[in-house]
Amino acid sequence: MARITSSLYTSHIPAVGAAFDLGKTHEDYWKPVFAGYDFTKQWEKAHNPDVIFLVYNDHATAFSLQMIPTFAIMTGPEFNPADEGYGARPVPTVIGHPELASHIASEVIQHDFDLTMVNEIDVDHGLTVPLSCVFGEVKQWPCKIIPFAVNVVQHPVPSGARCFALGQAIGNAIRSYPEDLNVQIWGTGGMSHQLQGPRAGLINKEWDNKFLDLLIDDPKALAKMPNIDYVREAGSEGIELVMWLIARGAMADVAGGPKPKVVHRFYHVPASNTAVGHLILENAA
Amino acid sequence: MSLDKEFKEIPGTVIFDAEQSRKGYWLNQFCMSLMKADNRNKFKANERAYLDEWKMTEEQKQAVLSRDLNRMMALGGNIYFLSKIGATDGKSFQQMAGSMTGMSEQDYRAMMIKGGRKIDGNRKIGEDGDAQRPAKD
């Protein structure tokens, strides 16, 4: 059967992708950001997943106001990096896992989560920046990736409670897939940031770290936090953090198993307008 | 069920909800068109003529022409859509975000390096923080 071996959480800041693509990772400004992923690069090589279920949001790239799916699972075979207005990032095409993705969609929809299924889509920095942070510069991504997009652009966006419950359903669906696969689930976005208005530049270090503490130790309590608290305390774009609860909901302890082990935790301010947060939780083998 | 009114009580912030989305539909869709190089060139060659091809209000067009991002947000724009205008102009997200705060680019960058804007005084309209200044409209 497929196994969820760990969950990984990270910001997906576009400027980090640009720094990476323009060879600026050794500049003083960027060094501490990328240093936060040094451990991760080695860890990921050692853990070598077959598939990553990657939760992210589209930033008005593939989904305009023509269509705004709340939850979309990408069931297609491959996805190209999008041109977000600066030209497409020079990173590999993302290879999907249509069989597992279709299985998850089928299971989760029958458990009352009404997903949108997407077969053709270009993926933006929300998906490719985390891959660059973890895998570095590669000719091809070393595993298959199932992109999963959440609307965090137009309110109302799904609540933390809904995301956490969805994560549980996704976890159960993955664990019921008959092939023996090593699966990781990633939650991306955040941490505190606001990109608009006179309050732009907001960072709330204390809140972010409390969020990380609760995500590790008491995700059930964290899932009860209303959306207004994210927006007020972590900025209008800090609401992206609800997506981390999808990944957290898929971990073994939420389904009655043992607590995950924290193998890496990192926090840094700033990258461009944003607080960078990064966490890895491993399920017991 | 409309959104909790507390969303409207956050200073210096426009919540992009279904109502703003309806108001800003064509403004945002115009922005989306700038993801194609041909359209960026057409827009750059004659901004007014290109804007006139869209069902935007005159106020929205003026806000685009003057690159007033706070005004565009008030008129239904969303920052992820509006950022396509910034990309067309060769501006980074930090330059765009900073331009909405009334700070110089240098001061905004320096604020971020020092840890960003503080939350204290900036949770609710009427407190004493530095984001209480109303948007320019």
Image: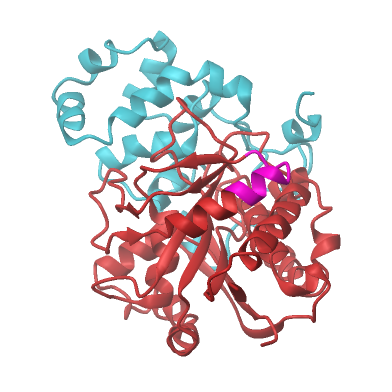
Chain colours: A red, B cyan
Q: Is residue A112 above or below residue A276?
A: above
Residue at 81% in and 52% down: A225
Residue A109 belongs to the span the image colors magenta: yes
Q: Position of residue A275 (x, y in %)?
A: 56, 64
> Which of A276 and A39 lies nearest the eye of the viewer?
A39
- Quarter of the image where one finds residue B87: top left
Residue positioned 32% across, 45% down in the render: A84
Is A31 situated above or below A177? Answer: below
Q: x and y percent of residue B97 in the render?
A: 46, 46
Q: Visible in this render: residue A204?
A: no
Residue beneath the point at 41% across and 73% down: A133
Q: Is residue A150 above or below residue A101?
A: above
- Residue B95 is situated, as x and y percent measured from the top left of the image, at 39, 49
Q: Is residue A171 left or right of residue A44?
A: right
**Quadrant of the image containing the N terminus of chain A:** bottom right
| Residue A146 in view | yes
The residue closer to the viewer here, B128 or B42, is B42
Q: Could you tell whether B97 is left or right of A203 in the image?
A: left
The residue under the point 61% across, 64% down is: A174
Q: What is the residue that sits farthest to the front in this orientation?
A: A178
Q: Which span is picked out in magenta?
A: A106-114
Residue B57 image point, x, y percent: 42, 10
- Quarter assignment of residue A197: top right
Q: Looking at the rendering, in which quadrant would you find the C terminus of chain A?
A: bottom right
